[in-house]
Image (spheres, grey):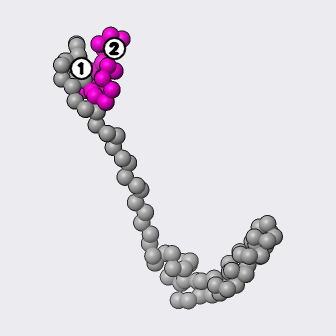
Amino acid sequence: MPGVNTAAAPGWYPDPQHHGTQRYWNGESWTAQTAPLAPPQATPPPQVVVNVAQTAGHQHGHGARYVSGLTTGQHIFHGTLTVFTGGLWGVVWWSKARFGRRRIS
């Protein structure tokens, strides 16, 4: 095939004259052997592992767990205020949730 680098290692290469096929290069010349191009291999999605014991509450020291000092309704209230104040209320919300937390074990 014209215009092909003859220094290439032997192997299967896309055939520029026949779309969707590949041709075998023996290291010196192109052979008559052709095959359909293999479809690209899909990359498997990354696996995510979640340690439920760690996500149930913040871990501090010897297994002590803490939860937010705010109820679900209070989180909704603070979230709404944060949106309406353009994010400014978020500092208050964070501090109430962080410093108002209680130990559960």
Q: Is residue 21 magenta?
A: yes
* Residue appearing at x 51%, y 75% in the figure: 55
Whether residue 68 appears in magenta in the rendering, the answer is: no
Residue at 36% x, 11% y is: 3
Mark 1 residue crowding within 10 angstroms, few (<14) / some (14–19) / many (20+): some
Q: Name the residue under label 1.
A: 25
Check the image and report above or below for 61 versus 44: below
Q: Can residue 58 be seen in this view?
A: yes
- Count all numbered tags in the image, as a single digit: 2
Q: Of 86 and 38, which appears nearest the observer?
A: 38
Residue 37 location, quadrant? top left
Q: Where is residue 4 in the image (x, y as percent from the top left)?
A: 34, 14
Residue that appears at 50% across and 82% down: 63
Residue type beneath disc 2 = Val
Reading the chain from its start, which is encountered first: label 2 or label 1?
Answer: 2
Residue at 29% from the left image edge and 13% from the top image edge: 1
Q: Vertically, is 103 above or below 39?
A: below
Q: Name the residue under label 2.
A: 4
Q: What stretch is highlighted in magenta?
A: 1-22
Q: Judge by depth and name the residue closer to the eye, 64 or 14.
A: 14
